[in-house]
Image (cartoon, rainbow, N blue to C red):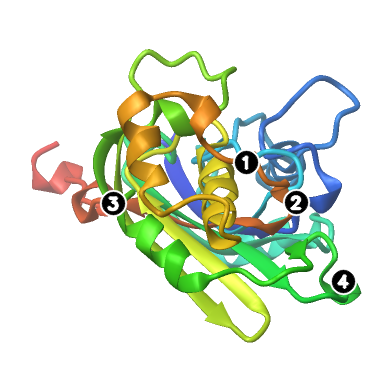
Amino acid sequence: MSDPRPNRNIKMVIAYNGAAYHGWQRQADGIDTVQERVEKAAIQVMQHPLAVHGAGRTDAGVHATGQVANFHSPNRSIPLRGMRRAINSRLPADIAVRSACEAPEGFHSSRSAAGKTYRYRIYTAPLRPVELAGQVLHYWRGLDVERMQNAARRLVGTHDFAGLATSSDQRDNTVRTIFRCEIARIGPEIRVSVRGDGFLYNMVRNIVGTLMEIGRGRWDPRRIDKIIETRDRRNAGPCVLPDGLTLVCVHYRPEDLELKPRLTQAQGI
């Protein structure tokens, strides 16, 4: 007799080093992506076809400590802890499922997301940090953190960020809200943390490239105001390499993660 209950909706938090992959999103055969690796491992464990949906399409070379993905499964025989361990045992060393839990039936890792936080790491020193290759952007000169902080504050709020999107981004709505944009120096590293309700294509990397131009003295911090006002990509800085970028966290409203108790036949169903 088949189980009348709805499929389980499994929410996973995934970390990965993106250096060896062509981004998160599944692509044509023969192109290695994080989504494909996770999906194949989950299929082996759950023993049925399934689709793993990710919260963000991180580009080639971009990393994650808090990517979120979900999939549906009728298989209720595997406990969540055992499921996570079994999936991890089938993943390469540079990908790991950090946690797995059951989410509401209607939860979707991307459509339910209320925002994301990204971090970008810039290593400022004359000598290249070989041990951090692929993890940071090496910049051999110093950067004025105070100027960068001044500029970063100008990004906070709801604006039309067309001037900080890559020209190939064809979305009609380019208005986004940045809740915070913070710059911190930790030893030789400068870390840029940005939290927003959503981001345009390459928007974070374009923000960092612009802040670096301001930090090295080429532009005044008020350059940010000009970029927002004109919506002209030519007024912004270069798109920096993906190496230093990490998807740190995907944010959700508590009510979208709340599991409501299901009524049983004894309770009237």
Query: In the drawing, does residue 267 fall left or right of residue 230?
Result: left
Q: Amino acid at mark 4?
A: Arg
Q: Between marks 1 and 4, how big is the CA–CA gap?
A: 25 Å
Query: Is disc 4 placed on a helix, strand or loop?
Result: loop
CA neighbours of label 2 inside 10 A, class few (<14), some (14 to 19), many (20+): many
> Could one spot residue 79 in this view of the protein?
no
Query: Is disc 1 placed on a helix, strand or loop?
Result: loop
Q: Which residue is mark 4?
A: 128
Task: Determine the residue positioned at 44% across, 41% down.
Answer: 109
Instruction: Tell me the tag on residue 58.
Output: 1
Instruction: Tell me the tag on residue 18.
Output: 2
Q: Which residue is mark 3?
A: 156
Q: Nearer the viewer, mark 1 or mark 4?
A: 4
Query: Is disc 3 placed on a helix, strand or loop?
Result: loop
Tell me which numbered mark, 2 or 4, is placed earlier along the sequence: 2
Task: Determine the residue positioned at 36% across, 63% down.
Answer: 150
Q: Nearer the viewer, mark 2 or mark 4?
A: 4
Q: Quadrant of the C terminus?
A: top left
Q: Amino acid at mark 2?
A: Gly
Task: Identify the residue at the far bottom of this view.
Answer: 187
Tell me which numbered mark, 1 or 4, is placed earlier along the sequence: 1
Tell me which numbered mark, 3 or 1, is placed earlier along the sequence: 1
Task: Determine the residue positioned at 73% across, 47% down.
Answer: 241
Whether the residues at callouts 2 and 1 have beta carbons within 8 Å, the answer is yes
Q: Position of residue 128 (x, y in %)?
A: 87, 71
Q: Nearer the viewer, mark 2 or mark 3?
A: 3
CA neighbours of label 4 inside 10 A, class few (<14), some (14 to 19), many (20+): some
